[in-house]
Amino acid sequence: MEGHLTMSTKERARMFACQRIVSGTLGVAEAALMLSISTRQMRRSLRRYQERGDAGLVHASRGCTSNRATDPVLKDVILSRVRERYEDFGPTLAAEKLSLEGLGVNHETLRRWMDETGVRTARPRKARHRSCREPRKHFGELVQMDGSHHDWFEGRRPRCCLMQMVDDATGIRMMLLSEEETTVAALQLLGMWIKRHGVPVALYTDKKTVYWSVREPTIEEELQGTRPLTAFGRVCASLGITITVAHSPQAKGRVERANGVAQDRLVKELRLAQASTIEQGNGVIATGFLDARFARKPASDADFHRPLAPTEDLSVALRMREDRVLTSDYTLRYEGRVLQVLRQPDLPLPRTRITVARCLDGTLRVEHRGRELAFEDVTETRTHAVRRVTGTKPPAPRTPVIPAPTHPWKQGLPPVSVRYAAANYNSQTIRYSAGP
């Protein structure tokens, strides 16, 4: 049967796992662990894949209403009653009181409804005791990522940042020097890792705004039940990479210790090579003097990295995308620039959301529903046109005015008695003139 098959990221991950099981490069139990599902469920997915191909992995209940769903009218009645009488009740106690009124509902269902509608505010929990975490067992299951600011060139150039990725299971690392810990540097390092090893399952980062967004979710994100994503987070989501943030430096201690090792060994290597630029420093790193020095054998030989599909273009996947609104004159505003969408077939309507994608080399792409739109940068033309119409000119420098020696400001203050009499007179004048 010809046509297009829409699959979610989770379903595509199962497809790649089934392909590797069929080819004999991955076991069923290891695939189930990689996908965080049970072995029986993995066998069922594999059987459907062998019988119906990729279509067998698509969820059959997609778009259908559950047969066990609660009547929406009853749900509204229960939530209204909770708001009226049991707003400060916990879900368990509220469910008990509702059952006495003939409105029976499971306490966990009520908890979910109260969380979705904002009726219930969860109580803050006490801090948990943290213990040592064992390394993951599979290569590519979890990769830690961090940036380290240091005087890497010992004064031969200003301070810069070392971006580093360390696999949690094997200790295999990859490094890249850049000016700062930016989104572009993080995407460049991630692209290098994917080209060499494949797409990892998860990344472990800190709460820097490059990886984790702190803004409030929009209305669309609240309705979809998703949290805000940074440009780096959107790229990882499109590749199926899960981002987990650490609440302390000790939580991602492996990459922190790797930064300490680099601050000792890499500095000395750059000194021996007389490197004084970032390009020269990356050339020293490319020799691989630390790639396998501290690597170790994982507990399992299975590789959890996902290879890129033939239809996936890594350069396209690593673009930083932001949404903009198309104005009535078919222009977009992006980082202080004005982009004019040119006349072409199938133009989107004004007030439509358009995606502006920035490539790693700095070039821009304007996209709408996966299709690139032709555009041109009219920032200079628009600025000159506004100045020509309004006749605005840059303000001339003002010459400071110095008062003459005979100016009243330089005559000094009158005696105290005169000042007091003047103030008294002014106050009386104001009082008399303020009558009806």
Image (spheres, grey):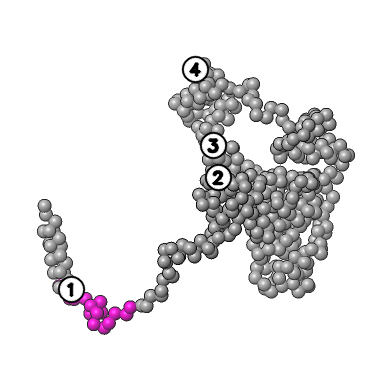
Determine crowd level at label 4: few under 14, some 14-19, many 20+ residues with C-alpha closer than 10 A. Answer: few
Q: What secondary structure is found at the residue carrying circle 4?
A: loop
Which mark, residue 123? 3
Which residue type carries mark 2? Leu
Q: Is residue 255 left or right of residue 127?
A: right
In the rendered image, the vertical position of residue 264 relative to residue 211, given as above or below: below
Q: For the residue carrying disc 1, how many other residues have a C-alpha within 10 Å: few (<14), some (14-19), or many (20+)?
A: few
Disc 2 vs disc 3: which is toward the camera? 2
In the foreground, 124 or 212: 212
Name the secondary structure under disc 2: loop
Mark 2: few/some/many CA within 10 Å (<14, 14-19, 20+): few
Q: Earlier in the sequence, mark 4 or mark 2?
A: 4
Q: Secondary structure at mark 1?
A: helix
Assign the magenta stretch its main secondary structure: loop
Q: Nearer the viewer, mark 4 or mark 2?
A: 2
Which residue is tagged 4?
Answer: 101
Q: Position of residue 295 (x, y in %)?
A: 82, 55
The kind of secondary structure element at disc 3 is loop
Disc 2 marks which residue?
349
